[in-house]
């Protein structure tokens, strides 16, 4: 990691960084067709899906440009001197160079210029990206587009670099210049990086977004209401992008008596056309997980199979009492498990026992709404995002987004990898005590050139005050 890039980027003004991020977003849109063609050949994803992802990635960069211009991410605060108490001025500063491990299921949104990278650059941290081994062409092409746009608009040379060697991961985490790690992938991969980072002479934080079954609970009255519409939503959410989404509803809890809904979901799942998975390796792991289901005695309502066009979807069913061991773990691919329950009350304990999740969804209507308080409390205590009468797929990139959760959803349940608050991972607070104005960062001076929101003597002050 270049020390020059770190020295220069951390002192680059927020407005300059914002300009660079907007230029990168524009360049991404300008080169979209070329990038889509490369990614489609490496992933089996459709051009429409990839085009939407490029737009999301560009919009995400613009969100962080808006954020750092506005300045609330600095959490600036001033406590003036008082009798017997010194003056204190505090704000957040970037932590240092960041290592990012790109994901394979979102070539752009979680790739070289994905949320980990753009939030770190926005914070003022240079980034080196360990590219995904299944996306060599996409990674190189994206890096060239983004690097040139950034360096032509005020970012220092070397602010964004990539490494492509398959075995470079451990060395990158153990590099003494690296101050933090962002990762999206499996529990095994994320936990390994976490352990490497913890074993360093100077441990560093690892923000790994890993595994989630995204429990979806259908309450009794909801299970009998609009069966056709609900079954269509469930089938679509579980098979979109061949089920290779981290927010796919992997466990769907339904009443034992909901035979009409179970039949309708089975029919919709059976109608889904075969889809090729991202890579042969993912296909092998997916088929291994289906074997785990069979050994655990899961009944197949829709039996998946491998075809020349790809994998057909799988729908299994089991009871709440049989949901143990391997059945509680994520299956990455177009497979979902229905879990039947006798009483909604018993589902609450199951949610707590399942552990950390990215999302938990509750579908409820009518009398259900008077019976889900404890269910929603359990969801909030175990998940980063709680959905009522929606679907977990489709993560909005916005100011209020949380994409994370308690372990094993992530290694740090107090963080998010998507949305404006993702920048918090790459910053730390510093207080200046009794420090003359000319030695302070501009944002903390009594009369700053570039005003930001600040809490002054306990009172929140807007930037335009």
Image (spheres, rainbow, N blue to C red):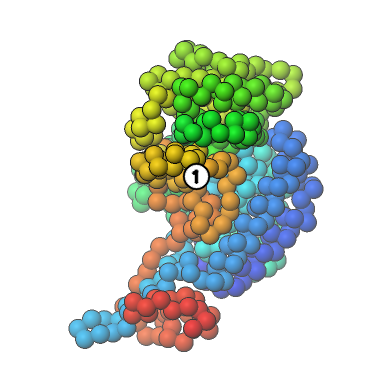
| Left or right for 345, reference 24 | left
Residue 189 visible (yes or no): no
**Where is 354 relative to 86, above or below?**
above
**Where is 395 relative to 399, above or below?**
above
User: What residue appears at the point 70 percent right and 23 percent down from the top-left corner?
Assistant: 271
Percent coordinates x, y for residue 302 in the rendering: 61, 18
User: What residue appears at the point 47 percent right and 63 percent down from the top-left corner?
Assistant: 94
Mark 1 is surrounded, within 10 Å at the Cα level, by few (under 14), some (14 to 19) or many (20 or more) other residues, namely: some
User: What residue appears at the point 37 percent right and 69 percent down from the top-left corner?
Assistant: 430
Which residue has dot 1 on it?
A: 387
Percent coordinates x, y for residue 83 in the rendering: 21, 86
Percent coordinates x, y for residue 124 in the rendering: 53, 64
User: What residue appears at the point 54 percent right and 51 percent down from the top-left corner?
Assistant: 418
Percent coordinates x, y for residue 7 in the rendering: 51, 67
Residue 43 visible (yes or no): yes
Specify the quadrant of the image occupied by residue 327: top left
| Left or right for 70, reference 434 | right
Specify the quadrant of the image occupied by residue 45: top right
């Amino acid at each position: 990691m270049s020390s020059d890039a770190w020295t220069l980027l951390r002192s680059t003004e927020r407005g300059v960084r914002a300009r660079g991020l907007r230029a990168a977003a524009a360049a991404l849109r300008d080169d979209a067709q070329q990038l889509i063609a490369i990614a489609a050949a490496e992933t089996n994803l459709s051009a429409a899906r990839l085009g939407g992802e490029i737009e999301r990635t560009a919009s995400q960069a613009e969100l962080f440009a808006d954020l750092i211009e506005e300045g609330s991410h600095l959490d600036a605060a001033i406590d003036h001197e008082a009798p017997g108490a010194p003056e204190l001025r505090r704000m957040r500063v970037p932590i240092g160079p960041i290592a990012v491990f790109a994901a394979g299921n979102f070539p752009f949104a979680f790739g070289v210029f994905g949320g980990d990278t753009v939030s770190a650059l926005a914070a003022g941290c240079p980034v080196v990206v360990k590219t995904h081994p299944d996306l060599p062409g996409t990674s190189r092409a994206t890096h060239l587009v983004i690097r040139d746009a950034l360096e032509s608009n005020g970012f220092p040379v070397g602010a964004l670099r990539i490494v492509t060697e398959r075995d470079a991961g451990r060395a990158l985490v153990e590099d003494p210049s690296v101050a933090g790690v962002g990762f999206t992938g499996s529990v095994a991969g994320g936990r390994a990086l976490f352990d490497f980072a913890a074993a360093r002479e100077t441990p560093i934080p690892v923000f790994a977004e890993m595994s989630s079954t995204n429990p979806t609970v259908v309450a009794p009255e909801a299970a009998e209401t609009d069966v056709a519409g609900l079954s269509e939503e469930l089938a679509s959410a579980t098979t979109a992008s061949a089920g290779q989404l981290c927010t796919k509803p992997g466990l769907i809890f339904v009443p034992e008596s909901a035979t009409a809904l179970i039949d309708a979901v089975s029919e919709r799942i059976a109608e889904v056309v075969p889809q090729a998975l991202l890579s042969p390796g993912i296909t092998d792991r997916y088929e291994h997980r289906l074997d785990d289901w069979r050994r655990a005695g899961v009944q197949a309502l829709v039996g998946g199979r491998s075809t020349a066009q790809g994998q057909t979807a799988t729908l299994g069913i089991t009871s709440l009492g049989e949901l143990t061991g391997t059945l509680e773990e994520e299956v990455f691919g177009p497979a979902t498990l229905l879990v039947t329950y006798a009483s909604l009350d018993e589902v609450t304990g199951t949610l707590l026992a399942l552990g950390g999740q990215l999302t938990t969804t509750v579908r409820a209507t009518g009398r259900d709404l008077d019976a889900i308080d404890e269910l929603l409390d359990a969801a909030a205590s175990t998940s980063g995002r709680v959905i009522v009468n929606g679907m977990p797929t489709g993560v909005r990139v916005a100011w209020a987004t949380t994409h994370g959760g308690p372990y094993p959803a992530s290694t740090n349940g107090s963080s998010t990898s998507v949305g404006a608050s993702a920048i918090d991972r790459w910053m730390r607070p510093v207080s200046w005590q009794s420090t003359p104005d000319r030695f302070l960062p501009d944002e903390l001076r009594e009369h700053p050139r570039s005003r930001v929101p600040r809490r002054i003597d306990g009172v929140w002050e807007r930037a335009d005050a």
